[in-house]
Amino acid sequence: MTPATVLHISFDFPSPLAAPHMTRAVERLVDSADGFRNIVYSMTRVGNLGREIAALRYAPDRVAIAYRALPKGLGLRHAMARLVRWIAADLRDRGIAIDLIHAHKLTTDGIVASQLAREFGVPYLCSIWGDADGWVWRGRPDLHGHWREIAASAHALIATAPWAAERFSKMLRLPLRAIAVLPVMGGVAEPTPSSVSSDRIVSLFHLAHWRRKGISKLIPAMQEVAETGAGWHLDIVGGGNARSHLEVDRLIARAGARRQVRLLGPVPNGSVRELLGGSAMLALPSQQETFGMVFVEALFAGIPVLYPAGWAIDGYLPPDRIGYACRADDPADIAAGLRHVMTNQQALKESIARLQAEGALARFAPHSIALDYRRHLSAALG
């Protein structure tokens, strides 16, 4: 039996033309869709004015597209219309008949997918990435009506977290039940409990993104709690270039926190689980975090997390069972969260171990996400 052909439209699919250090979340999800032929068009905007479109066929059923367009969503519909015409012509030239389209974001990919769906008479579904889609939404209020039409016509809407589903159900004027929730797929291994009692707080991220990861609020909060817990210290772990290393080091120096905060640099991927499992907690009060796979990695390693309320993994699990949901823009609340988790470290680690044993973390496992995703695709195909 010939498998159904799914066309994937994404601005976040790693390719030779995509931005470096791009997350592999969309790629992992597409690769997990066994039983379907998955054709991917990975798009990357370049420069400002211009109408050029260039493509690179870098793997079977994988096409990278570079196109010129204005930044910040200016001229968005016109730019997307050019991509629609190019992709439609390319599919016809290659003799490919598609059965379903998945737009991996609503506000950009969804414009392309909805027009291609009309062109070829097939259904489409849209993912919703809370921060990325929210940023474009806020920048183009004149397109709110258009995005509502796209959402209403989609066979399914899939948000990456409960808070994103709740927020976008109001923005799109749809009932909450109209938006499914599917976690971001990472490469986590089987969950393991942690019984280690540690004074080490770890913050794990690529230093190039320090402005968004809340480190400028976390460092002074760490300095404040240092008086509470003798020996508590923060290790900032992650790669980066010379500039980002200097910038974060400057934050530490200005806070007078060199005794409490260390910059450790990157660790090999295979060592992340060991690093997390041997720590007291993960602290990452990130700004406008869509999901934050590192929080799931920490929970799978058995340690509690300090994460931003209303963002990231908020809504998946009760905060009092996994750590602390902080106000990410409030150093005082971040400090309160650090104190809470550190003084209740063992109780929280035992709580997380019970969640692991109960299967409460199973929905974050790659095989569970893949199964749910294939169900969404099959349902859309009828």
Image (cartoon, helix red, strand yellow):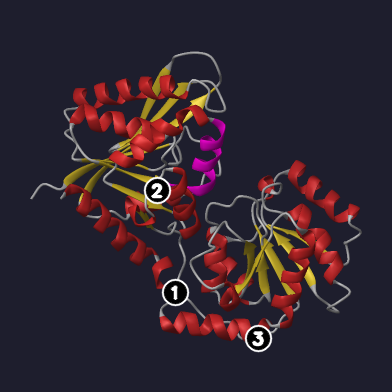
Q: Which residue is drawn at 18% across and 32% down?
A: 121
Q: Give the mark, 1 or 3, whose residue is nearer the N terminus.
A: 1
Residue 161: percent from left, percent from top: 47, 57
| Image mark for residue 190 | 1
Q: Give the mark, 2 or 3, whose residue is nearer the N terminus.
A: 2
Q: Is residue 132 magenta?
A: yes
Report, in whole angstroms, how far the alpha carbon at label 2 lies from the one at label 1.
21 Å
Q: What residue type is labelled 3?
A: Gln
Q: What residue type is labelled 2?
A: Glu
Foreground disc of the pair 2, 3 = 3
Which residue is at the front of the view, 378 or 90? 378
What is the residue that sits farthest to the left in this orientation?
1
Cβ atoms at labels 1 and 3 below 8 Å apart:
no
Q: Residue at x 25, y 58 (%)?
A: 375
The local crowd at label 3, few if under 14, some if 14 to 19, many if 20 or more residues have their Cα within 10 Å, is some
Which residue is at the front of the view, 228 or 41? 228
**198 versus 236 height, above or below:** below
Q: Residue at x 56, y 32 (%)?
A: 139
Look at the numbered disc 1 and give the secondary structure of its residue. loop
Foreground disc of the pair 1, 3 = 3
Q: Which residue corresponds to mark 3?
A: 346
Q: Give the range drawn in magenta.
A: 128-139
Residue 82: percent from left, percent from top: 37, 19
Which residue is at the front of the view, 6 or 196? 6
Evaluate whether residue 139 shows in this view. Answer: yes
Look at the numbered disc 3 and give the secondary structure of its residue. helix
Evaluate whether residue 102 shows in this view. Answer: no
Report, in whole angstroms, how far the alpha carbon at label 1 lies from the one at label 3.
21 Å
Report, in whole angstroms, how far the alpha carbon at label 2 lies from the one at label 3.
37 Å
Q: Which residue corresponds to mark 2?
A: 27
